[in-house]
Amino acid sequence: MAKVLVFSEVSKDKVKPVTLEILGKAAGQDVDVAVFGDLSDEQVKVLGDYGAKKVHKLKGDNLDKYSAEGYSNALKGFIESQGYDYVFSGATAIGKDMMPRLATQFDAGLASDVVNFIFEGDNFSATRPLFAGKCLAKVEIQGPKPHFVSVRPNALGMPETPAGGSAEAADASVEAGNIRAAIKEIIASASEKADLTEANIIISGGRAMKNSENFSILHECAEVIGATVGASRAAVDSGYASPDMQVGQTGKTVSPSLYIACGISGAIQHLAGMRTSKVIVAINTDPDAPIFTKADYGIVGDLFKIVPILTEELKKIQN
Amino acid sequence: MNIFVCVKQVPDTETKVQPNADGTFIETTSIKWIMNPYDEFAVEQALLVKADNPGSTVTLVRVGGVKDTEALRTALAMGADDAVLVEADDNLDSYTIAKALKGGIEKAGKQPDIIFAGKQGIDDDALQVPQVLAQMLDLPAVSVIVGYEKSGENISVKREIEGGALEVYEVSTPCVLATNKGINTPRYASLPGIMKAKRKPMQQLTLADVGVSEDDKRLKYSDFKLPPEKPPGKKFDATDEAKQQEVVAEVVKLLREEAKVL
């Protein structure tokens, strides 16, 4: 049985859902959870229910705000004191940034952004998408332990029924050390919509949107179904949409339950970024557009006509 | 200032990826190689910083195959001054690459003030090298930056996080900064730039020269395969305006009742 630590971010006294996904998949190992700062008894109970044995609340100066140096220094000291074999985190903005630094403090390997993993006896292996998901590969970690793994949110899925159990909570004091890159300010996003990578529904526009004003028809539709608006590289490079909206190999890799592609032809690099969406709808005037090969439901027609009708139809079912 | 840029050469984004015969990587024989798109922003930012700090140099460091040197030639043509190329396979893990980059930077014989890199290689999508390299050099790092400003002795950078929110960092130099799309608009190489690039110095080293061996390998890849193909979907013709209402209503119904996503 491997000794495993799952690091979890906490926001508004809630652990990240990916933490529970990892706990479910790591069932059968000796698993602890670590968080920075406080966590309610209620959340400790949830973690115990999903299989955590201990919940360590790491406390120290200069850890109220995230920094790659502070978090990795503090975790390094804590991990050394406990002797873990494996350390997991979600491949979130923080996980992606901090885990490489933490692993290197141990001269250890990190399998980042994995979409599956398995413990088999003393062996561990994971599956990673490469080339934005154009292919998948098995990855094993070698060299000194602990071995580090970051897991893509929403990839493992929630365990159907929590294993049941209870976790013991304890405080541990840790040192953030020297922080040379520190957050001075956080600028909230203008949009209150879910991030593309976390969105349940995405409606994206391509070059055929013709200009940025026309994106308003996508926003209107998105409003009705709580979707996040995305864009193709062609639309971003033409200045119709901002770079943080870009879906594809040089933008964001997304896997919503519903992806609606409007006026997107389906360049290989775009398909790579959205092909793992559960259901894909494509709207395009060109019946031979490559996007139709990936679409569950294809509508050959003018998006400027189709999208407003779609918005009205969706309004009907929302009421 | 001594500015460094880590550059990776990756398969073009339009590449149809095929696993190789033994499943350890992809087939690379007929691939068109390009500079990693996120590294173009790193090169551009380095050139902008150089323009603001006369007397600075921009040195490129790349670890990878030497048969094709498109990425370095493009960056030199954009205006970088010189390059260090560490000959290696194109499928190394992040730890090995970072250690080789560190060795390459040390061989260049000047203390770095800023090391730029793209936030991610679009081949293995690991997002590791900038922070690994920074830790190996004991430097601070900020990744996924979309804004850069001088702030007295320090640098103020904006890092993009979930939902398009931004973290504003103050970071001391020397440091490692990993660029995201949106930070600048990379320039095109001019014709005179391309001609000049051919005469710019490029130091070529081996992995042994920079102290990297097989023992540094941290990840072992196998079973490269294509993701499962989806069965073909349903396609509706709505080019005729009279049919549009009916088609859209049908698709919405299918989304609700068949796909169950609404």
Image (spheres, helix red, strand yellow):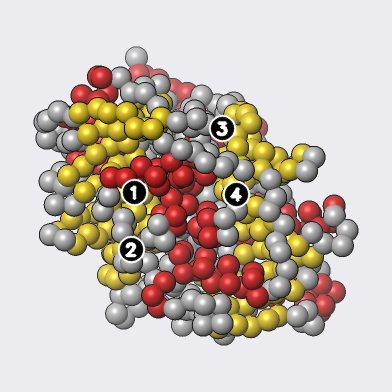
* Alpha carbons under labels 4 and 3: distance apart: 21 Å
Residue type at numbered disc 2: Pro
Q: For the residue marked with disc 1, what is the amino acid?
A: Glu
Element class at badge 4: loop
Point out the tag, 4 or 3, that comes first from the N-terminus.
4
Q: Position of residue A216 (x, y in %)?
A: 58, 29
Q: Callout 2: 10 Å neighbours few (<14), some, many (20+)?
A: few
Residue ID at (39%, 71%): B217
Report x, y in % for residue B78: 76, 66
Q: What chain does badge 4 belong to?
A: B
| Same subunit: marks 1 and 3 | no
Q: Of B103 and B192, which appears nearest the observer? A: B103
Say which residue label 4 marks. B140
Which percent across, then down, holds residue A84?
Answer: 27, 49
Which of the labelled discs sits on residue A144, or is there none?
2
Q: Callout 1: residue from which chain?
A: A
Q: How many residues crowd around disc 3 within 10 Å: few (fewer than 14), some, or many (20 or more)?
A: some
> Which residue corresponds to the image point at 30% horizontal and 75% vertical from the top-left?
B23
Give left or right: position of B1 versus A165: right
Residue A209 visible in the displayed image: no
Residue hosting label 1: A80
